[in-house]
Amino acid sequence: MNAFPPGATATLRTTWRWLREPIAFFDDCKRRYGDTFSMRIAGLPPIVVFSDPEAVKQIFADDGHTLEAGKFNLSLRAFLGERSVLMLDGDEHMRQRKLLLPPFHGERMLTYGRAMMELADAAIDGWPLLSGSGRHSFALHPSMQTITLQIILRTVFGIDEAAAMAPVERNIAALLDIAAWAPLLLPPLQRDFGAWSPWAKFQKEAAELDRTLRELIDRRRREGTAGRTDVLSLLVGARDEEGAPLTDDELRDELVTLLVAGHETTATSLAWALRWILARPKVEARLMEELAPVANQPDRVAKLEYLDAVVRETLRLQPVVPIVGRVLARDVSIGDYQLPKGSAVVASIYLAHRREAAFPDAEEFRPERFLERKASPNEWYPFGGGNRRCIGMAFALYEMKMVLARILTRTTLRLDPREHIKVVRRSITLTPSGGVRVFMHARA
Ligand code: HEM
């Protein structure tokens, strides 16, 4: 058995490349070192990166007592709070996860379909039509962020009125824009260097969000949750195996987690989906054929096979989160390596999704591949895996379908040919540069 495989050493350049050009960095590592390599990033333990299905299977099979995701996610603690499910490990994690899962069960999503479509429609109504006089394109990504944020506020927080939503929307958008600067993930920069420093600005916005969330929790407890379908109401009523509810601090941290984990990820995946659909006329035509007869019926849209394949192919080719990681609570052997306690393993979503053995012509956007063959959970895992798999997976897949159905059947969009779309990092997500600029030729 080997100890660490060769890889990128602990230099400022390695950290800089990981933060600034993660895709080129991973491609280079794979070319130089093969499937499995190590990397050393400032502020993180030594990491071994895996993408071959057998090693990934082993990582996802752990029960959470040996491979700890909470410890790996530490750089997010200052953003999410220490009681967030993403921060916890072992029994504490399982308790919290079990309380969070029921509201996100696949069947429950049907309750939210209509609201998702309405919020998408309202955003579409505000887009500028291409007029004879101007050649102005607009970016889709910010609009996707508005839609997915409003969907979370409505379905998770239970805020129904636009007037009540507006200040929260401003607050959250400001917060996430500050947090988008990737170096802020490094703990040494999470310090107040004066009122204008990013961390000081972040703290100010975070305090405002904290007040809003505590008021919301307090009101829901006082007014009761009878007849309400939002996730917060379900969580207020949830009890663990000992009959204990979530405390206010736990609820607050979970709400921030659902917001942060659920909003940008889905918005960015939608922007990537449109980037590829609009660039592939045959895909767009096949989708339109499938969507046209059912586009305002959430339950039928949810079951469309080609739409499902398009969403899965988008998440394969452009995974918004490129890696998931775990820290070792004891010495473990994974693949050919005997790794010491305290080091970390990463399952690379990005590299796994580009393996030719699982996805022939992996660089191509070809949704049909998901109709021809079902990918295993250690080959295709945009939502991570095992007992840490994304709680919002069914929610996100469903939401993407609802929003795409409305956009594609109500508008005629064309990509702005002047844009060359590249992958850029926004905090922990990989987003399209320029935000996917389009012209809207028609709107129904
Ligand atoms: C396309 C959209 C999304 C993507 C790509 C995504 C991706 C991920 C990934 C990669 C993880 C880490 C899994 C691991 O460590 O193995 C995760 C965890 C999580 N996600 Fe998502 N996510 C998305 C949408 C959502 C939504 C909509 C919500 C909720 C509203 C959500 C809530 C969570 C939570 C609570 C966790 C922590 C699970 C745990 O630690 O047990 N996500 N997500």
Image (tube, rainbow, N blue to C red):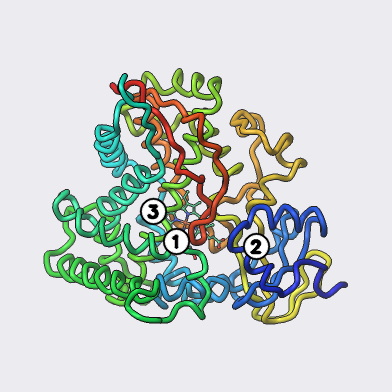
* Distance Cα–Cα, label 1 vs label 3: 13 Å
Can the viewer see residue 300 in this picture? Answer: no
Specify the farthest residue to the front.
133
Q: Do the residues labelled 2 and 1 touch (CB within 8 Å)?
A: no
Dot 2: element: helix
Can the viewer see residue 200 in this picture? Answer: yes
Q: Earlier in the sequence, mark 1 or mark 3?
A: 1
* Distance Cα–Cα, label 2 vs label 3: 26 Å
Viewer-proximal residue, 1 or 416?
A: 416
Q: Nearer the viewer, mark 2 or mark 3?
A: 2
* Distance Cα–Cα, label 2 vs label 1: 16 Å
**Number of other residues with Cα within 10 Å of mark 2, as a class: few under 14, some 14 to 19, many 20 or more:** some
Q: Nearer the viewer, mark 1 or mark 3?
A: 1
Q: Earlier in the sequence, mark 2 or mark 3?
A: 2
The quarter holding residue 347 reads bottom right
As drawn, the label of residue 59 is none
- Identify the amino acid type marked 3: His
Q: Mark 3 points at which residue?
A: 263
In this image, 421 relative to 353: left or right? left
